[in-house]
Image (spheres, rainbow, N blue to C red):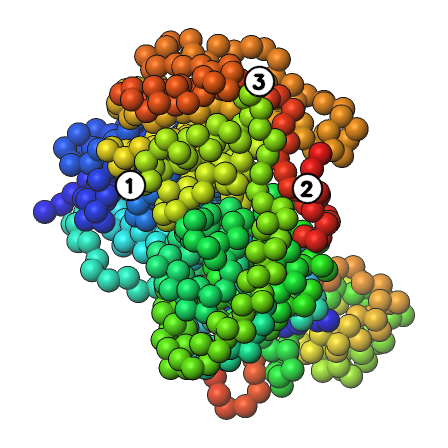
């Protein structure tokens, strides 16, 4: 039987197992929206296309499935850009479907036309303009395959209106054949053998973990590997939740706002085992002084990540799950040597414990004014163990990374690569849509919250009970901190003096608003929020000029941490 | 250092921009680029000349390989290869210089493909250095217009890349 392009799209989504999509209608996708009513797919109407893409992204990060968003051509499509770039930088699997003007009008400056293929080329893993309805099923199959395999990423399908209306026989391909796309999953056994040799010879190894571990669902393998050799583990912001922070081997985060002991361990290590990480400049600080004594083993599914920023002594291309499993198996064959290694590493672990004791992750408590770190600690204490936490971007994001002590993979969703303010609220919405029963918390600053606060309406409409925490310092705090430290306290355009009543704002949308202005109210507000059904905003009036510490100033080495203001 | 790379890609619209965008997006320079379909019309072959140290070249080849539309990347650095470029040169040919132009054309085994009372248009193929040389000799006689194709290359020997592997 023949089907129209828009029916083919929806049939294919169903076959891909898509149960929820996020989007915003318009003229060039009106056919899709019309047919949507006949399909078992839940559509969430966001209030801005950026919100829809971030929501699909949050859904993808929380579930490990491909997130799907739909937008109309022109302004709808251009509104998706920040969301797509955010997903691209963090390697999140998304399929974004944009409407396009009819093929005959493409290139003619038609009403609501934008060259979205051209615009999204540098921020997608791949993109397609569908010119013939006969290609549509194959393209959708490929798009999902490309989005979720190898190093995952966003794929855009630009679908002209006439292609949506044209019809053809629908056959969904069973397999995908793309000549130029064959990701390497299996780690080379000889390289793995070499890696094991280097590990057995190490005296001060550190495992440095990036977002790849979450993407390949290799947290258990990582834990097994680290415990086998009893080596310390430091994670990037993206990998925060993939290694339990309460494990004695955990060093927490490294880099600019990492722990003192993680950065010291890196600086003194003789072997760095990089696992699904990409040596971001926020992590390495000055390259010349990054891990100066260490040999580097770099495991990654994406060969372009390897040797991009730092020299690498041993590259292993492959899926982390596969490589870590093989590594543990290989180590299993050297039980005696592993035992010896664990004993050899004892002084190294002691050295690290010394650094931990000297400069633990801490802040100056107060009983007069609310410290943002205190709010994070209380949230951790009072929330469920499997709560999903999203953040916006700024100081609150770093404090969350430092003090929330994540324990389970896919419970910390944050924009690491692009650093997108306005990410957290829609991402929380997406995660909550995926897991209606779980506790979902967006931790925000007053600045970031205002970037996508319109999504509050979506939360209320779909009864998504996200709990929003606003650490209100009336500043664009992170920028203010830099101005204080590096620009002589000239606070240019970072003061958000207008006192917004976030409690009333919540109420205006039909949500609940709560506020704490002194430390003794914090616990009560959190408890009350968690006990209240539906979306809740908790506004905390926090210390205005608190800084995120410790800190490696931009351009300095990890050994040059500033510990206190 | 100069590098010559062949990239075999899906012959689809937009692929050229993808490749070019990859270079511009990372600040790599393309010195010359030529593209056309191969024996298999679904595959195009690009010959790209670029410059950079080993590390940059490694990134370039890895990034090219990463494009979904890329089927194969061949880096000719350190290999024996045949390199040919074509140029069309419109050169002033008045009474006093006609003979000199023809002499040069003859020496270089080039061809005159268009004649007017005031000009010859010369076609030449060869290694880029040979084209540089004829251009230098014709320049003093007055070049009106010049177009070069950029080189195309193939590896020497009997082995060949025919399509599917
Ligand atoms: C879309 C966007 N614009 C600008 C920035 C630059 N920026 C980074 S942090 C920050 C301040 C964030 O302020 P707020 O959300 O109030 O959080 P705080 O740092 O106070 O916790 C800004 C402006 C950004 N990361 N993203």
Please tell me which of labels 2 and 3 falls first in the chain. 3
Q: Do callouts 1 and 2 point to residues on the same chain?
A: yes
What chain is tagged by disc 3?
A: A
Q: Nearer the viewer, mark 2 or mark 3?
A: 3
Pointer 1 residue? A163
The response on whether ligand 1 sits within 8 Å of label 1 is no
Please tell me which of labels 1 and 2 falls first in the chain. 1
Q: Position of residue A178 (x, y in %)?
A: 35, 64
Q: Residues within 10 Å of mark 1 (few under 14, many from 20)?
A: many
* Left or right: A416 in relation to B143: left
- Residue at horizontal 72 percent and vertical 50 percent from the top: A560
For the residue pair B76 and B109, the one nearer the viewer reads as B76
Pointer 3 residue? A368
Q: Position of residue A491 (x, y in %)?
A: 72, 23
Whether residue A84 is visible to the viewer of this picture, yes or no, is: no
What chain is tagged by disc 1?
A: A
Whether residue A34 is visible to the viewer of this picture, yes or no, is: yes
A450 vs A238: above or below: above
Please tell me which of labels 3 and 1 falls first in the chain. 1
B80 vs A13: above or below: below
- Residue at horizontal 41 percent and vertical 22 percent from the top: A523
* Left or right: A442 in relation to A459: right
* Left or right: B85 in relation to A148: right
Q: Where on the picture, by quarter, is residue B129? A: bottom right
Pointer 2 residue? A563
Q: Residues within 10 Å of mark 3 (few under 14, many from 20)?
A: few
Q: Position of residue B55 (x, y in %)?
A: 65, 67
For the residue pair B154 and A292, the one nearer the viewer reads as A292
- Residue at horizontal 74 percent and vertical 74 percent from the top: B131
For the residue pair A228 and A347, the one nearer the viewer reads as A347
Q: Residues within 10 Å of mark 2 (few under 14, many from 20)?
A: some
């Amino acid at each position: 039987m023949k089907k129209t392009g828009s029916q083919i799209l929806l049939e294919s989504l169903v076959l891909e197992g898509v149960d929820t999509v996020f989007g915003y209608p318009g003229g060039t996708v009106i056919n899709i929206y019309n047919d949507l009513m006949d399909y078992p797919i839940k559509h969430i109407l966001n209030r801005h296309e950026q919100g829809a893409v971030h929501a699909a992204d949050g859904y993808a990060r929380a579930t490990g499935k491909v997130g799907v968003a739909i937008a109309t051509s022109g302004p709808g499509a251009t509104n998706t850009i920040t969301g797509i770039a955010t997903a691209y930088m963090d390697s999140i699997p998304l399929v974004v479907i944009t409407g396009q003007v009819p093929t005959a009008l493409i290139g003619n400056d038609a009403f609501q036309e934008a060259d979205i293929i051209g615009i999204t080329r540098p921020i997608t893993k791949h993109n397609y303009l569908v010119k013939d309805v006969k290609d549509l099923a194959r393209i959708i199959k490929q798009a999902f395959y490309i989005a979720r395999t190898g190093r995952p990423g966003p794929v855009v399908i630009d679908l002209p209106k006439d292609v949506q209306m044209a019809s053809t026989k629908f056959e969904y391909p069973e397999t995908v054949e793309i000549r130029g796309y064959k990701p390497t999953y299996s780690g080379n056994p000889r390289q793995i053998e070499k890696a094991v040799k280097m590990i057995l010879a190490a005296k001060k190894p550190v495992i440095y973990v990036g977002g790849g571990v979450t993407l390949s669902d290799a947290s258990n393998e990582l834990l097994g590997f680290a415990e086998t050799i009893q080596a310390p583990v430091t994670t990037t912001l993206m990998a925060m939740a993939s290694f339990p922070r309460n494990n004695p081997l955990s060093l927490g985060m490294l880099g600019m706002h990492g722990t003192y002991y993680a950065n010291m361990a890196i600086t003194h290590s003789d072997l760095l085992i990089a696992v699904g990480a990409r040596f971001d400049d926020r992590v390495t600080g000055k390259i010349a002084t990054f891990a100066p004594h260490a040999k580097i083993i770099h495991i990654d599914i994406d060969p372009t990540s390897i040797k991009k920023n730092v020299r690498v002594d041993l590259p292993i291309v492959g899926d982390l799950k596969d490589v870590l499993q093989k590594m543990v198996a290989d180590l299993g064959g050297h039980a005696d040597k592993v035992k010896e290694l664990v004993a050899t590493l004892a002084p190294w672990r002691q050295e690290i414990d010394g650094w931990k004791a000297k400069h633990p992750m801490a802040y100056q408590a107060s009983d007069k004014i609310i410290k943002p770190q205190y709010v994070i600690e209380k949230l951790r204490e009072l929330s469920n163990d499997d709560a999903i936490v999203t953040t916006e971007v700024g100081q609150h994001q770093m404090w969350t990374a430092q003090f929330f002590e994540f324990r389970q993979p896919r419970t910390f969703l944050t924009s690491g690569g692009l650093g997108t303010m306005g990410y957290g609220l829609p991402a929380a919405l997406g995660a909550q849509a995926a897991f209606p029963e779980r506790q979902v918390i967006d931790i925000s600053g007053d600045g970031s919250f205002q970037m996508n606060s319109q999504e509050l309406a979506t939360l209320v409409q779909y009864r998504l009970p996200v709990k929003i925490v606003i650490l209100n310092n009336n500043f664009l705090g992170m920028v203010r901190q830099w101005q204080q430290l590096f620009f002589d306290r000239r606070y240019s355009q970072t003061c958000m003096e207008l006192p917004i009543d976030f409690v009333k704002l919540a109420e205006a949308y039909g949500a609940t608003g709560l506020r704490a202005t002194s430390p003794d109210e914090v616990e009560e507000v959190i408890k009350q929020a968690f006990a209240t059904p539906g979306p809740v905003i908790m506004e905390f009036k926090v210390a205005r000029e608190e800084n995120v510490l410790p800190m490696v100033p931009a351009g300095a080495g990890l050994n040059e941490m500033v510990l206190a203001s | 250092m100069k590098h010559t790379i062949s990239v075999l890609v899906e012959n689809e619209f937009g692929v050229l921009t993808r490749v070019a965008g990859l270079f511009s997006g990372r600040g790599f320079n393309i010195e010359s680029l030529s593209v056309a379909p191969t024996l298999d019309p679904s595959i195009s072959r690009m010959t790209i000349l670029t410059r950079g140290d080993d590390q940059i070249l490694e990134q370039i080849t890895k990034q090219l390989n990463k494009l979904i539309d890329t089927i194969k990347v061949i880096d000719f650095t350190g290999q024996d290869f045949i390199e040919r470029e074509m140029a069309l040169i419109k050169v002033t040919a008045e009474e006093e210089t006609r003979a000199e132009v023809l002499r040069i054309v003859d020496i270089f085994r080039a061809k005159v493909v268009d004649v007017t009372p005031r000009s010859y248009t010369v076609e030449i193929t060869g290694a880029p250095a040979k084209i540089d040389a004829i251009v230098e000799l014709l320049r003093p006689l007055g070049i009106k217009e010049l177009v070069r194709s950029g080189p195309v290359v193939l590896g020497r020997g009997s082995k060949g890349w025919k399509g599917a592997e």
